[in-house]
Image: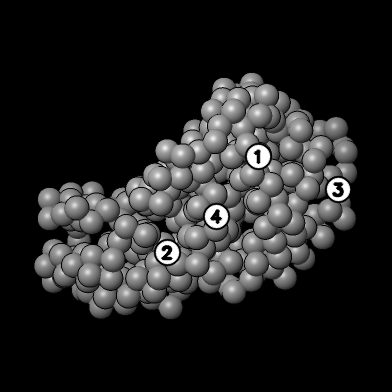
Amino acid sequence: MIDLRSDTVTKPSDRMRAAMAAAEVGDDVYGEDPTVNRLQERAAELFEKEAALFIPSGTMGNQIAVKVHTKPGQEVVIEERGHILNYELGASAIFAGVTIRPVKSADGSGMLTWSEIAEVLSTDGIYDHTQTGLICLENTHNLAGGTVMPAGQIGGLCDRSHSVGIPVHMDGARIFNAATALNESVADLTRNCDSVQFCLSKGLGAPVGSILLGSREFINEARIWRKRLGGGMRQAGILAAAGLIALEESPKRLHEDHENARRLAAGLADLPGIGLDPDRIVTNIVIFDIAGTGRTANEICNELRDRGVLTIGFGTKIRMVTHCDVTRQDVDAAVAVMRDICG
Ligand code: TLP
């Protein structure tokens, strides 16, 4: 099977498995797991943030950030296709008691401008308006097709947001893909963000885990919420050992996934009925429209599956994601199957 459903499907490398087997561990709820502590310290150093926390998933990281930054009854501003709104099962309403204000990104990139954000902000304290408690950014933007926002633009948004007293959380599930595509450091990309969540378990290839970053005060509070949510993982050094390798080794090879995604997009864009601009593919996510084929996404995905290619369909779109377990030959094979189906 060629699994293009997501970069979450990656399997740990032999080096990761060996490190997991040999990991020194302790009880992380007591802060005594040396491998978790090393991973947290290394992540904080790389992102140039005061502190970091190892958490089971990106979803938990985002939700803890929403909870810590906001008060119940406030509103979180996010681009309308953002993960926190669309794929976290309404968790912000349940845990933080906030509502979400989705904002359309006019150019379709998923990257909001300050004027798009400013239009929906409510910061004046007037009692009959829902107050904005947080702005969430997503880099890369998953549903927009792995698009990226450069450091200058993020810094500018954060400055404007802070000037009206609103914190910014970065859902950086794939921030290392953004850093690779932009040739900028993850520290620069998130410098002015009040908190950042990034995933070890996606393009970086670790089996489980994310890291939440921010000020020492923010992380102290986040640690309490992690425990409340059932995310205190005890001898988690077994997982952190793989995370450390993911953090050190995997960013170096992400450009290969991006090259494969561009190759995939170029192959698909030539097929009849496929709506896809290959120039917009800058990281590892390829989303294309199949309306012109006269078939539904489900029909095409099922046919792909029967012929050994796993993908995800939604509406009239199909998503294919490249990652370390997908080779250039796999990409060519997937295009060939699509050519048979659509040709
Ligand atoms: N995304 C998954 C699905 O949930 C859609 C995927 O296959 O892409 N932020 C972003 C931008 C994400 O894409 C994801 C996962 C998360 C957060 C959540 O991470 P996990 O799965 O670790 O909870």
Q: Which mark is residue 284?
A: 2
- Can residue 81 be seen here? no
| Residue at the image position 12 percent from the left and 55 percent from the top | 307
On whether ligand 1 comes within 8 Å of the CB at mark 3, the answer is no
Q: Nearer the viewer, mark 1 or mark 2?
A: 1
Helix, strand or loop at mark 3:
loop
* Cα distance in 3D space between marks 4 and 2: 18 Å
Query: Closer to the camera, 63 or 225?
Result: 225
Contact flag, marks 4 and 2 (Cβ < 8 Å): no
Helix, strand or loop at mark 2:
loop
Q: Mark 2 or mark 3: which comes first in sequence?
A: 3
* Cα distance in 3D space between marks 4 and 1: 14 Å
Q: Estimate the x, y position of residue 304 in percent, counting from the top left.
A: 18, 55
Contact flag, marks 4 and 1 (Cβ < 8 Å): no
Give the residue number, with chain letter if any, for mark 3.
165
Q: Estimate the x, y position of residue 169 in percent, counting from the top left.
A: 69, 48
Q: How many neighbours does mark 4 have within 10 angstroms: few (below 14), some (14-19), or many (20 or more)?
A: many
Q: Estimate the x, y position of residue 45 in percent, counting from the top left.
A: 71, 54
* Cα distance in 3D space between marks 3 and 1: 32 Å
Query: Closer to the camera, 94 or 170?
Result: 170
Q: Nearer the viewer, mark 3 or mark 4?
A: 4
